[in-house]
Image (tube, rainbow, N blue to C red):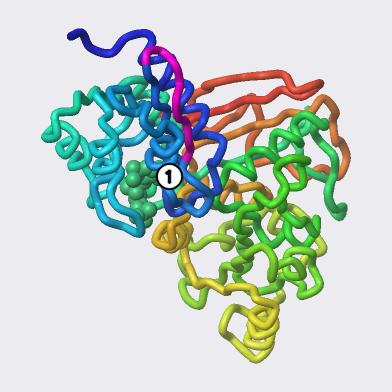
Amino acid sequence: MGGPTREDERFMAAALRLARSNLGLTSTNPSVGCIIVKDGTIVGRAVTAPGGRPHAETQALAEAGERASRATAYVTLEPCSHHGKTPPCADALIASGIARVVVAILDPDERVAGRGVVMLREAGIAVDIGVLHDDGERALEAYLMRHRMKRPHVTLKLAVSADGMIGRKGEGQVRITGAISRAQVQVLRAETDAILVGIGTASADNPELTVRLPGLEGRSPIRIVLDRRLELPADSKLVRSARDIPLIVVTGDAGFASPYVWGEGPRSAGEGQSGRTSLPLTSAPLAGSGDDYAGRRAKLEAADVEVLNADTIADLLTALASRGISSLLVEGGARAARDFLDAGLVDRILLFTGPEAIGEGGIRSPFERKSVPAGFTLRRTARYGDDIFEDYERES
Ligand code: AOF
Ligand code: ZN
């Protein structure tokens, strides 16, 4: 019998597309796609359910029923071999009478790690591994990053004007990109586990950081604000919605003298956290240095905001990974973007460049199309209306 065929690739591509539909909904589990094919016809298809269970295979097998016998299963991730909240998918596949299983990626979870494949083969099932391997790595990049590096996969999103600005000093949200780009950002938010902004952006823009695109409502990720001194106003949209959509505010009690802590690096004259002048960042008391801070902390916690301590970006990412967050979208402003870039903890950059200049009073972006940081390669480019979209990936 020959190895994988073009038809195998076609069905695996379909399973990968299916997996994408629940991205951002299944944490701490990856979103896995499974397609069951009998005599060239799809008889079962499923994706990991929101919340992570049931797994894809058991649902696809349930749909296929008797037709699973002697069929082929295409699964984007190696079927599990462990008894978690549900029995192993490998056992379910064996019991169904499946003849062959095609897998894109082996599961790095130490409870599985090849054992799923061994179980299937010992039961006499043919297993092909690595079909559309590279596409599988991409589809599961956040999950793989959390397992391999013990941190989430980090995407930095920037919307930059034609003259390299991300906003205007003293103003709230300034429209830089058009409707298509903004809709794309909503999709990105829906597909990610958590979104992060700095306190400058949170104060100046008063954003909600939710998903409002029709059809994607209810898919808002966890929101995170870098806010060392706990200055996020209690009446901000973020805090007011914290009972419905989780909000984490990141503070730090130590390490103020260190150049490696976030939010403390050199700042150009007249710039706030995201470039605004009006913020009392430098005059505010330091974290832990008085009642004021304790009072603000109590107020946030009373509003169901989680206050998390992390002195460095690396510490923050470790804490997020340990609670199962696999993907993080950094949405601004300039200071937060720089903190992540300086820490070397950006995996992907999505750059939206609008057609108009901001001119006088603009807040300069940490970089623009002509000056993307070294170490990133352009993977894809598109036009969204009058905007140019570029997708850069960190060179490994
Ligand atoms: C599969 N199919 O659709 C997914 C899998 O907490 P549990 O019991 O749900 O186990 C979580 C682990 O299951 C996760 O770390 C990964 O190894 C695997 N995910 N496996 O066979 C699926 N989502
Ligand atoms: Zn499973």
The answer to whether 335 is drawn above or below residue 33 in the figure is below
Asked if one can make out residue 274 in the rendered structure from this viewpoint, the answer is: yes
Residue shown at the point (42%, 57%) measured from the top left: 321
Question: In the image, residue 30 lies at what x, y percent?
Answer: 43, 44
Q: Is the magenta stretch mostly helix, strand or loop?
A: strand
**Which image quarter holds the N terminus?**
top left
The amino acid marked with disc number 1 is Pro
Left/right of residue 396 with respect to residue 277 in the rendered view: left
Residue shown at the point (61%, 68%) measured from the top left: 249
**Which image quarter holds the C terminus?**
top left
Left/right of residue 359 with respect to residue 219 in the rendered view: right
Residue shown at the point (43%, 30%) measured from the top left: 138
Question: In the image, residue 183 lies at what x, y percent?
Answer: 75, 35
The answer to whether 253 is drawn above or below residue 242 in the figure is below
**To which residue does mark 1 refer?**
30
Question: In the image, residue 218 lies at what x, y percent?
Answer: 69, 52
Q: Would you say residue 41 sits in the magenta stretch?
A: yes
Asked if one can make out residue 145 in the rendered structure from this viewpoint, the answer is: no
Q: Quadrant of ligand 2?
A: top left
In the image, the residue with mark 1 has its CB under 8 Å from the nearest atom of ligand 1: yes
| Front-most of residues 394 and 124 | 124
Mark 1 Cα shell of 10 Å, populated few (<14), some (14-19), many (≥20): many
Q: How many marks?
A: 1
Left/right of residue 81 with respect to residue 275 in the rendered view: left
Left/right of residue 295 with respect to residue 150 in the rendered view: right
Q: Would you say residue 284 sits in the magenta stretch?
A: no
Residue 272 sits in quarter: bottom right
| Front-most of residues 162 and 268 | 162
**SS class of the residue under badge 1?**
loop
Range drawn in magenta: 39-47
